[in-house]
Amino acid sequence: MQRATEVNCFFACNHQRNIIIMKNFVEIAVIGGGVIGTAITYYLAKAGFDVCLIERNGIAEGTSGRCDGRVIVYDQVPGESCRLAKMSLDLFPQLPDELGFDIGWSQEGTLLLMESEAEYQIAESHCKCMAETGLPYKMLDYHQVHSEEPGLAENVVGGLSVSCDGSVNPMALAQGFEYQAVKQGATVYSNTNVLDIKSNRSNTVDHIITDQGTIRVKKIINAAGSWAGAIGQMVNLSIPIKPRQGQLIVTERTFPVSGQPVSEFGYIVTRLEQNDYQREVTPVMEKYGIAFALEPTNANNFLIGTSRCFTGFDLTSNKELLTAMAKRAIRFYPGLRDIHVIRSYAGLRPYAPDHLPIISDTEIEGFYIAAGHEGNGISMAPITGELIANMIGNIPQRIDIDPFRWQRFSSPKEVDNA
Ligand SMILES: Cc1cc2nc3c(=O)[nH]c(=O)nc-3n(C[C@H](O)[C@H](O)[C@H](O)COP(=O)(O)OP(=O)(O)OC[C@H]3O[C@@H](n4cnc5c(N)ncnc54)[C@H](O)[C@@H]3O)c2cc1C
């Protein structure tokens, strides 16, 4: 099995090429080399299509290299998105063998923490509802959660365990998809910026103009994440995806504060029906949409998040935000107070107004969109690849894809409940 480090070296050499010679024609071009674009390229190549991937930088240098690597259902509420997330999660265990690549997959579950009796009661009914859909949700009372997590603040009242969740190395995931896609015959053009798309008289995509040359195509998949809107404009589609910034703290290597990924349940409450529920957070935490999440890495340091705000394409770290995020983490694990931060970074979640990804054909013949996965792109990459490959191959889908169709934004009513 290829390890990410060996292949990184291979990619680094590849990306240093100065001269890129593009083919004259390819049947399908995928634009964007994040987890979504690489997954689609892999599933299309596996299905036997003549496919290329075009990425203006290196693989996973967009949001897929600036995020956590959780593969989760815990942040879902019952419905289509939850089904999609679970179907995707179920594809992960076989991916390391299928791709012949070490993607850092592990399935350690998620522990959600409740900080008040009110949250605990909401968690109990949420747990029952999710368990009824067949998901492994289980409540932990005060004693259970504190014996599992000795470092917890004393006044955390309980926990909710979601044992099916997992984690990957998101960069290795994208590289793994790329590695196996190339083995199956796909071509990858990195350091190649898409400048324009031209259609023919019958409104069918015809060719792509890049800074490395022009390539004729039959079909294009727009998998440009937060930049999907700019690609859409090239064919006169107004795609309402915008960047929703998230920042993360990386701590030094330290004692195991927690052995498992943990998040606060309070943030999920804000996504449930009980919209009148108020978390006990400061105005600064509210302003930056801060919710506690902690992910241990194999090297024994921690990623601490999260934040959610609209700041355009800004990737700079913000001290006020990071301080508030650290305070929120210390509220749940007081021992974190003594641990150093070694760095922080920001990424841009591709946000769609109704929080559902767009996985769809469009009114432009041959132009498809696979973008807008917001905080679930890592989790939903494999299923997105499968759905697009089925769509193009006219193979029946395993799930109703109507909720993810682009056409929902063509109707006059647009939802914006961020
Ligand atoms: C802080 C943070 C934490 C997160 N944690 C998680 C998590 O734990 N689990 C999870 O499932 N999701 C998580 N996410 C969300 C996840 O990272 C994204 O949903 C996912 O990375 C989006 O992948 P993508 O391929 O759509 O976009 P990207 O990875 O951004 O890829 C799009 C690519 O398109 C390229 N591109 C753009 N324009 C052009 C052009 N003109 N020509 C050529 N190429 C172009 C870009 O360079 C970029 O590489 C997190 C996000 C953030 C910010």
Image (cartoon, rainbow, N blue to C red):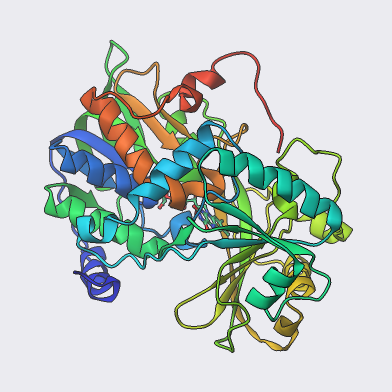
Q: Is residue 146 left or right of residue 303?
A: right
Where is residue 18 drawn, in percent x and y?
Answer: 22, 62
The percent coordinates of residue 339 (x first, y second) are 67, 87
Q: Position of residue 414 (x, y in %)?
A: 65, 22
The quadrant of the picture occupied by the C terminus is top right
x 85%, y 45%: residue: 277
Assign the N terminus to one quadrant of the image: bottom left
Q: Determine whether, in the image, residue 99 is placed left or right of residue 58.
A: left
Who's the residue at 34% across and 29% down the image?
Answer: 398
- Would you place residue 15 above or below residue 47 in this image? below
The residue shown at (57%, 31%) is: 240
Relative to 192, residue 386 above or below = above
Residue shown at 71%/59% (left/top)?
291
- Specify whether 313 is left or right of 387: right
Is residue 53 in view? yes
Please indicate whether residue 222 sits to the left or right of residue 122 in the image.
left
